[in-house]
Structures are given as structure tokens and as C-alpha cells.
Image (tube, grey):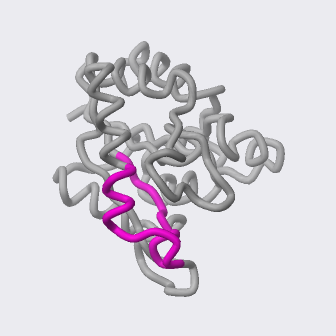
Amino acid sequence: MKLVILDRDGVINKDSVLSIQSPKEWIPIEGSLEAISLLNKNGYTVVVATNQSAIGKKIINNATLDSIHKKMQDLLKTKNAKIDKIFYCPHIEEDNCACRKPKTGLMQKIKEHYNISLKKIPAIGDSARDLEAYSKCEARPILVRTGNGRDVEKRKSYPSNTLIFDNLLETSKFIIKMEW
């Protein structure tokens, strides 16, 4: 199985310091929908692993998150693309759950759902906690310079085996070229 793991905010869509609180606020980063379409057309299953603490903070509820994800999937359909499954952590840091990145609970759920090893699976994020979670599961961490990515790159706060690209479209082209 050819699998790619993506973080959501800052990788697929523009991020917000106040959290994405409605479908209206969910705005794709230029080229990100095309990137997912390109991956799908080349046989890749694309999944999302995302921290969504806005639920734990009671900023949004599950129904709102579902409507945000519906907008994302609807926009992807216009590009003949889809996210196969969305794995999310609704907790806040103080909950000390097992699923909030940089912990590996979301990665374990992906591993179990698809019954595969995540070893060397491309996993793309824009934060140090994304990359740390991916690395702990032996996935290949990839940093994009969108979202918080430029700051993470400047601070050099990422695993040593991290690849770095400008955006998701550039990353997707590389993954396809390498026949990952």
C-alpha cells in the first residue's frame, strides 16, 4: 500500500492562531488540493492526522469539525481527489492523552486501521510536534515551509532525517518521482 500522512492546518489549509472555527475559515493553501489529487492519481492513499484541540477547548464541537472536513472533501472532489480517512485528537495538552502529537496515538490508529508498518511512510507536517510524532513511528518526516514550517526550519527543531520542501505540491511531486 502506498500511503501518505498529512497534518491538516498549515499543510493543506491556512492555519489560524485562534483555530479554524467554521467551514468558511477553512481556506486551502495554494496547490494543496492539486497535490492531493496528484498523489491519488498516482495510487497513493492520503490520510490526515491532526490535533484539533479546539474541540477540547470548547471552541468548536464535533459537528462543526465534521462540516469543516466536509468542505475539505467537497473541494477535493472538484479536483478528483479525496482524503481516505481523517484521524484527529480532540484533546488539549493538559488532558495528557496518548493521541495528541507529538505522542504517537494517531499514528498507531493509522497503523492499525490499514494494518501496515509506518516505517519510511512519507508524513508531512508544518510543526515540530508533527515531525516528532512521525519520527517516533519510523515514518519519514517531511517539513513544509507553509503554516509554521518556516519558523520550525529556522529554529532547526526537527528530527535529523527530515526532508524540507516549500509546500505540499512540491512534496507530492517529489514523492511521486521517487516512487515512494
Q: Nearer the viewer, residue 69 or 39?
A: 69
Residue under the image location 50 percent in, 59 percent down? 133
Q: Quadrant of the N terminus?
A: top left
Residue lying at the far front of the rendered structure: 24
Residue lying at the far right of the rendered structure: 154
Position of residue 37 relative to residue 146, above or below, is: above
x and y, in percent, of residue 107 in the image: 36, 59
Residue under the image location 46 percent in, 68 percent down? 60
x and y, in percent, of residue 96 in the image: 50, 85
Q: Nearer the viewer, residue 131 or 62?
A: 62
Instruction: Determine whether, in the image, residue 103 is placed left or right of residue 72.
Output: right
25 falls in the magenta region: no
Q: Nearer the viewer, residue 155 or 167?
A: 167
Magenta residues span 48-68
Q: Nearer the viewer, residue 143 or 32?
A: 32
x and y, in percent, of residue 38 in the image: 36, 18
Position of residue 34 relative to residue 101, above or below, is: above
